[in-house]
Image (spheres, coloured by chain):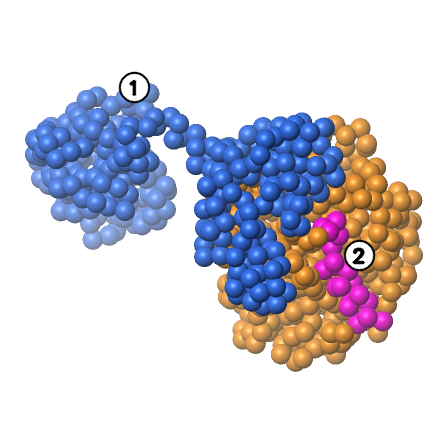
Chain colours: A orange, B blue
Amino acid sequence: MVANIKDKAVICGIGNTEFSKNSGVSELNLAVRACKAALDDAGLSPADVDGMVTFTMDTSDEIEVARALGVGEMTFYGRAHYGGGAATATLHQAAMAVATGMAETVLCYRALNGRSGHRFSSGVSGTITTADAIHWGWYTPYGLLTPASWVGMFTQRWMHLTGVTKDALYEVAKATRDYAANNPAAFFHGQTFDRAEYDAQRMISTPLQLFDCCQESDGGSAVLVTTPERARDLRQSGVAIRGVAQCAARDQEQMTSFYRQEFAGIPEMERAARDAYAMSGLGPEDIDAAVIYDAFSSIVLWQLEAWDFCGFGESGDFVQDGALRPGGRLPVNTHGGQLSEAYIHGVNGIVEAVRLVRGTSVNQPAKTVEHALVTSGVGIPTGGALLGKQD
Amino acid sequence: MNDEQQQAFEQCLYRFVGRQVCARTAAKDAVNEAMIRHWAETVGDANPAYTDAQWAARSARGRIIAPPAMMYSWNQEGFPVVAQGRAPDAQTELVDLFNENGFTGVLGTNVKQEYYKEIGLGERVHLEMVIDNISEQKATARGIGYFFETLASFSDQHGDLIGTQRFRVLKFIPPETAAAADGGGAEQDTLQTPTRIAAPRGHDNSWWWEACDQGQVLIQRCRNCQTLRHPPRPMCGECQSLDWDSIESCLEGELLSFTELHHPRIPGYPLPLICGVIRLREGVNLVANIVGAEEQALAIGMRVQGKVEQVDEKTMLPQFYPAENGVEK
C-alpha cells in the first residue's frame, strides 16, 4: 500500500477560461487567466500561492505563470508526464506537497491552444526531438501516427474479446452530448444529436468514427489545492482529496502498449483504482458521480471496468442501462466531457468533479454527491482521484 | 559541376560585379504623411517625430521627418509587379544565371543601412542600385553557394545622399538537388514524392533496422536466459543481463488486432492503410502493415504471413498478408 494522505489536502478553488477553437491569445495567457479564476473562486491572491504543478506537455513554465500572475516565493513546483495521464497526477503531486508541508497552497493548471495551435490529431511527425523518439519509431513507418489509430487498435481487440458493440460507444457519446447541450461553456451547447448523425460521420480509424473522438480545443483550466485548516477559512466549501493514485504498469508504453501478451485492458488503471480506494476507505458503491477521461468513447468503458463499477466486458450493458445519465447509477461527464465540452487534457474534468461535490454542476444530479471520481487519460501511465465533501 | 565548368560559370558570374541594377530614379510619391503613418503603424513605431505634426513643430527639427529606416519603401515597386513580374535588370539576370546552374536556393542573410541626412514632407527620394560584390564559392550550412550584395544609394531632390542600404543574399544548391546530382542525375520529381516517416536510429535499435533494410526481421534474445524481447532494449527484464543476440523471425503469425486509418490522410502512406498487431510464432508481438486484403476480409485470430518488402524508395518494412494468399517464403 502506498502512503496514506487521505483528506490531508483540499481543493479550494477552480477556474476555467472560455473554451474555443481559436483563442487568439497565447497559451500562457490562458494559463494565467485560468489560475486567476481559481484564486478568485477561493478568495485568495497570487501572493498566497507557494507551489505549482502542470503537465510536462504544457508550454507555460511555472515561473512564467508566477511572474505574470504575481506569485512570490514558490517552494514547490513540479510537472507530471504522459499527456492526459497527467490530469489527476497534478492533484497527486499537489496533495503530496501540501500533506507533507512542502507547500501550503498549490496551483494545478493546464492551458493549450489545442485547435488553433498544435493539434494532437495531426499525429507524431518526423521532427520529433523528444527522448522517446525511438519508441515512436516502431510505429511511424507503418503510419500508426495518431491517437485515434492507437486507441482504435486497442478498441478493436477489446470489442472482439468482450462482444461489446458500437451501441455502447454511441451511448457514451450520446450521454456527453446531452449533458453538453445544457452547458453554455460546451462546444455542443444547445445542439441535438442522434444515432443517425453519429452513424453518418466519417470513419477516423476503425472502429472509431468522428463522434467517438474528443474535441480539439483552445482553453485553460486550473484547480487550487491547500491544507484542510486553511480551506475551512475560505470562500467555498472545501472538496477533500480522499484518495489519489497513479501507476505505470509492466511493459507500459505511451499509447502503444501493444507488446503486452494481452493488450485489451488497462492494468495501470486497475492498480491506481485499487490504491485510491484503499487510501480513501471507499469502494465503487460509495461513488455517486464521476468524470471519466474521454479522449475517445471506448476508453470510458474500460475505465468503468477498471474502477470496478462492473466486470470485464460488462461495461456495454452497464452504460446501455442508462448508468451514465442524470438519474442513472453513475452520472458521468456531466459537463459534456472532452467529447462534448472541451478537450483541456482532463483538467476541465477535475473542475467538474469539484463542482459535482460542491453541488454546482450545470447538470447536478438530483441525489446528493458525497463522492466523485475523476480520472486521467489511459493507454498511458495514468491514475485517478476520489473527491468528497470536506468534513 | 567540375572544375572547368565552375571556372566558366564564375567567369560569367563575376562580370556582374559593379553592374547597375537601376539608374538614379525618383520615387513615384513625394514624402507624405499617409505613407509614413502606414509604415509606422505596421512597424509599430510610435515616435511622434514621424506622425505628430504639433509635436514635431515644437521639436528641435521644427518639422515632421520621414523615418530613416523607411527610405527603401519610397521606391518600392507597386502591386502590379506581383502579377506582371519584374522587368529584367542586372539583378534578375544574375539570379537567372545562378538558377540555371543549380544554385536555386535563396536566403537573404543581412541588411545594413546607413543614414546621412533627414528628409521632410514634400521632398523626393531617389534610388540608384548596383551589384556591389560577389563572394568566392562558400560551403555553408545550407549548401554550396555564393553571397552577392547589392548597394542601394538614396538621395534627395538636390542629389544629397540620404543613406545607403546593403542587402546580402546567399544563392546555394539545396541539399536534395545536390544528392540527386551525386546520384547520377536522378529525377527530381521522384525525390519529391513523400516517403514514410523513418524510425530514428540509435544505439538500441539501429541493428534491427539495418537488418530490416537487408530483408530480415530479427528478434532480440537474452544470451543469459534466452528470453525473446521486442522492441529491442538494452537490458533483459527477466534476468537483467546486458548480453544479447538475436534470431530471425519466420514471420508467421496470428493477427491480434488491426485498425484502418481513414483520416487524416498522411502523405507518403498508401491507401488503404491498415496497421495490425501480429503475434509471431516465436512468441513476441510485432506491429506492421497488413496488405493484400481489404479490411472487411480481416479478422482477429486469422493467420498471417509476413515478408520484408520495399515500400517506397527509402524504406524496407515487414508487411503481412492473410496466410491463405499463399505468400512464398
Q: Between marks 1 and 2, how big is the CA–CA gap? A: 67 Å
x, y percentage for residue B31?
A: 23, 35
Q: Residues within 10 Å of mark 2 (few under 14, many from 20)?
A: many
Q: Nearer the viewer, residue B241 or A104?
A: B241
For label 1, the residue is B84
Q: Nearer the viewer, residue A338 or A248?
A: A248
Vertical position of residue A108 compared to residue B170: above or below = below
Q: Nearer the viewer, residue A302 or A336?
A: A302
In which quadrant of the rendered view does residue A297 lie?
Answer: top right
Question: Is residue B188 shown to the viewer in this render?
Answer: yes
Q: Residue at x 43, y 29 (%)?
A: B193
x, y percentage for residue B262?
A: 63, 32
- Indicate the quadrant containing the N terminus of chain A: top left, top right, bottom left or bottom right: bottom right
Parent chain of label 2: A
Q: Residue at x 30, y 38 (%)?
A: B175
x, y percentage for residue A126?
A: 47, 44
Q: Residue at x 64, y 49 (%)?
A: B282
Task: Tell me which secondary structure the magenta stretch mostly adopts.
Answer: helix
User: Is residue A94 one of those drawn in magenta?
Assistant: no
Q: Residues within 10 Å of mark 1 (few under 14, many from 20)?
A: few
Q: Nearer the viewer, residue A231 or A333?
A: A333
Q: Secondary structure at mark 2?
A: helix
Q: Residue at x 51, y 34 (%)?
A: B309
Is disc 1 in the same subunit as disc 2?
no
Parent chain of label 1: B
* Residues shaded magenta: A262-281
Give the residue type that dot 2 points to. Ala
Q: Which mark is residue B231?
A: none
